[in-house]
Image (tube, rainbow, N blue to C red):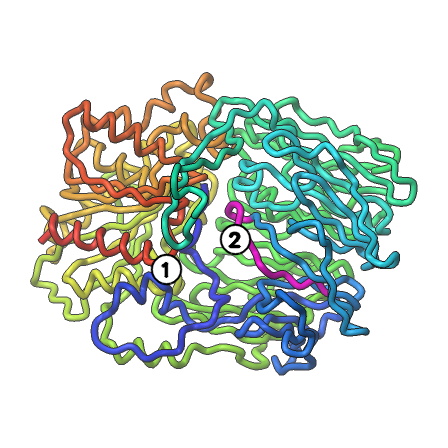
Amino acid sequence: MKRFFWTAVLLFPFVSAMFAGNLNLAEISKWQYRGDGIRAVKTAQDGETYTQLSSDGRKVESHSFKTGKTVSVLFDLDVVKTAGVDYIDGYMVSPNGRQMLIQTHTESIYRHSFKAEYYLYNMGSNRMVPLSKNGPQQTPLFSPDGSLVAFVRDGNIFLVKLLYDNAEVQVTKDGKRNAIINGIPDWVNEEEFANDRSMIFTADSRVLVWVKYDESKVKQYSMPLFKGLNPEYKQYDEYPGAYTYKYPVAGADNATTSVWSFDIASRQTRQLQVPIDADGYVPRIKQMGDASKVMVTTLNRHQDCLRIYAVNPLSTLCQLLIEERDAKYLKEECITSLVVTNRYILLPSQRDGWLHLYLYNTNGQLLRQVETGNYDVADVYGVDDATGDVYYASHEQGAVEQQVYVAHSNGKRNCLTPKKGWNSAIFAKGFKYFISQWSDINTPAVFSLCDQRGKTLSTLVDNRELNGWLKSMNLGKRELFTLTTADGVNLNGWMVKPADFNPSKKYPVIMFQYSGPGSQSVKNAWGVGMAGQGAMLEQYLAQRGYLCVCVDGRGTGARGAEFEKCTYLQMGELESHDQVEAALWLAKQKYVDGQRMAIWGWSFGGFNTLMSMSEGRGVFRAGIAIAPPTSWKYYDTIYTERFMRTPKENPNGYDITPIKRAAQLQGSLLLCHGMADDNVHFRNTAEYTEALVQADKDFSQLVYTNRNHSIAGGNTRNHLFRQCVKFFDKELK
């Protein structure tokens, strides 16, 4: 369960308009205040340029890392006119720089996955043809030499041979919906391991390796679908339909996984001898520099043991390189941020109580701990094979700050982005340059080109127009703060005050929070708030006279393993306790009306809203829970069991739920949920409302037709936020 849309990286163009007067809820709902950015940036193999999709979605351009100026136009839809292609959703340049895949007519499936129509464009001849004429494709992948493209359709893998007039070869034939999937993960593996592709080529392009998921024993879930509007499903005009897919709940059967190879020349398929637990996972497979090997990672069901193997895809033999264990669970970043190069394996680990980086050679020998200290690494950009230097981002300057660093092989470290705030980077091949993204809680993102020492070469985007508008609006002050609970726990928070804030006046308070394990909502970054965009939704509420607050309690990230993992086996207990403690601390401030306090959140934040309102001390007059889990027995295996183990192993922990505490609910409650939520099923709200009814508890409810976990589409988000604001006005004013 991840934060799904609020933590936006500013990669989309700002709607250029000057807004005047009070904030507009519809504009906030349409992300009008997100700011300018750069779209679909990819680094080129030469280390000197990067490619970028133009703001109008019609060109793919090459830009200099030194100047940011356009070097060349690699593709122009106005020049290469093809019937049925009127917009570019995405693109992929081949490793040899001769071919390009143009993505269009994209149809989203789940959070990461989608299918689209791809066109193969030859840069030398300006010729563009469909990658396949047999239906949309998923996760196309160029071979390292650029001569092949692999893709998935209907659970099967296909190869397109570019040197043989784009001949299409079917690699697997056992793919079947809700039964067998080749090369792409099933729903739960995609959602919880942040991955939409499970296939790779060997370094010499001779062998294709993939993970097969057999989900035939996984129980299925059906969501009702109606005709609706925007989009309109005309096939359901007379009778409603349903979307049915495999979804393993905590303690239930998962898909079984196996790893396979296909020798392209001989067309021989082999199953690789990877030791996978019967109920274990294969979260990643990666290419290695040695063409005779691929890397396969396995994870046991408790997710406390990660094994990294080198596997020969032809002999099928397997060698254990690294084994990583944790007394509780391994953070997802240990898997998702794992880096493999021709010479090195870079592994994030919490083995010393903080998330740090450990550098191994490709034989599994530990070379060094890259950096150390009482802070967490936040992101991993890679390791330079030529020098052994490691590039990463961390919270060394404080949990709410993020800077970009290089750790040299001689032990010295340099901060490449010393400015206070939230810094991230996109590095060129070879790490000679990087694109820097910086913001702070009061300043929209600035994108700059920098050299490897961190010197700014040029500014790509400065969001000057948005900054000017913000200054003219006399918005409320955004500020970071810390508090200490009655238990002696120090917590970080941010606050948005009304522009005309009067410290002698008492204000009603609305607390937004998320609180999921390892998450972070309190940052010195522009993208904070329920709807991101510089807490602009909170600014809208502040204009209506509210004080808006967010506090990260125990279980959240960036503060080490002890702080993060203290919620293990008891999700909801400490998280809700800390939100109540934060509310009690706020109530002691002379400018806060302790009798008019509310709490709200989305997803895990909705769960914690319900838990906080049922904690027993009755500090919240009102609350809004959007798309909340209400029993961890209803949520998926990978996420839930990582923090809770199974219901059979931890029955007491699974009893810590809003459903079990329905009779303890205090305050007015608004529940909101989409009926087509594939992530947190509507059943969570349905079962909770039934518990409330039987406990004789009053509540209000909003149900959104055909909407998934994001509750978006057409006017939906605007409607949702307007109802939330009306609810707060009714209950707190």
Q: Amino acid at mark 1?
A: Gly
Q: Residue at x 45, y 16 (%)?
A: 648
Q: Which residue is mark 2?
A: 378
The question of residue 459 being in magenta is answered with no
Q: Nearer the viewer, residue 138 or 206?
A: 138
- Residue 720: percent from left, percent from top: 28, 52
**In the image, residue 56 above or below residue 240:** below
Q: Residue at x 19, y 70 (%)?
A: 499
Mark 2 vs mark 1: in front: 1
**Residue lying farthest to the front in this orientation:** 238
Q: Are marks 2 and 1 in contact (CB under 8 Å)?
A: no
**Left-right relation of 161 to 227:** right
Q: Residue at x 64, y 56 (%)?
A: 117
SS type, badge 2: strand
Residue range in magenta is 100-112
Q: Quadrant of residue 729?
A: bottom left
- Residue 367: percent from left, percent from top: 73, 47
